[in-house]
Amino acid sequence: MFNQQNFTDQILQHANTTFSTLHAKFLKKIWGDNNTTKKLHNNQVYTDWQNGIYEAYIPTRDSMDNNLEYLRIAIQVLPEVSNDTKHQKAYDLSVPIKMPLGNIESEFLILIAPRQDKWGLVKGFKHRNKRGYFTGVFVNKSSDIIWKRVLDQIINFFLKRTDGLFRSLGFETWVWKWAQHKDSSLLYYIVEHFSYVIRQSVFTFVKLYQHLMGKMKEVLNEIGLQNTAKTHLRTLEVMNPRDLSRYFMLIRDKLDVTLHNQSFRPDELKVLQVLRNG
């Protein structure tokens, strides 16, 4: 049975593992290492578990007047969304929970719900008449499928942003894609003659793209495992009790052989032993 609180918690967990980890992984080194700049003083994220709200600020470029420029990502998990309510929900979500140490230069608002009131829901719109301000509406009962769709849009945003930055520097867009796959140090040599401000933005966008693609692989793997489990479950549901009992005996026997003849990490071994013991 569907549980709204579990759904909300799963979405917020996805948000935290995707965005709250950025500061420790690379943003602190790029924007606050004291060697080049010391402007990102802390991890600027916020989670309201009770009301299903998440907010994160990602630095996009340096600013002489406003410390740093930021992309604001804000998420609201709702029980239901409709064409009649989505604009008001986006307006409410556009009010920052905590202002960043700098200026908001773009904003992606994300409205998430397990259902909509009727067909024909418009899934995206500009909530401000300004470039870079967009609201996406995502509806599905699977938190993993929703997060895959969220990542699709965010990856596309940074892909276009990075392509545009490299074009403005006089490079073809394939250059950064090729360099990041070959050797990350190549990116430094490509942009070393530009100002540190430009280099900081380049490193941020490329690292973000790599990180988000990694998260996409994780969620696609999870969706694949769930689909495989559902396929096997449908097979088991039509078996009579006697065949089902024999089936699980065969599975345990096969797992015993596997456990004795192969090496596993402790976490993998624990899972297999649980399966074996039923």
Image (spheres, rainbow, N blue to C red):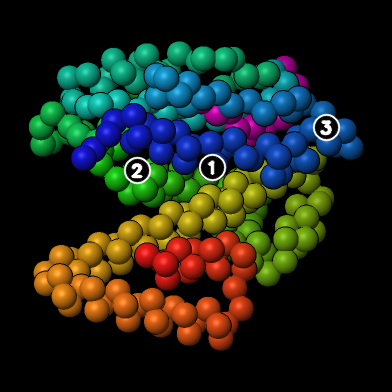
Would you say the residues marked 3 and 2 are in contact, meaning their CB atoms lie under 8 Å apart?
A: no
Mark 1: secondary structure? helix
Q: Which residues are magenta?
A: 55-65
Q: Which residue is mark 3?
A: 37
Question: Residue 18, which numbered label?
Answer: 1
| Kind of residue at badge 1 | Thr
| Front position in the image: 146 or 179 | 146
Q: Earlier in the sequence, mark 3 or mark 1?
A: 1
| Front position in the image: 81 or 50 | 50
Would residue 91 be seen by someone viewing this image from the given angle?
yes
Q: Alpha-carbon distance for marks 3 and 2?
A: 38 Å
Describe residue 180's horizontal placement relative to residue 231 as left or right: right
Describe residue 58's horizontal placement relative to residue 235 as left or right: right
Q: Nearer the viewer, mark 3 or mark 2?
A: 2
Estimate how packed mark 2 is, as few (under 14), some (14 to 19) or many (20 or more) residues with alpha carbons within 10 Å.
many
Q: Nearer the viewer, mark 2 or mark 1?
A: 2
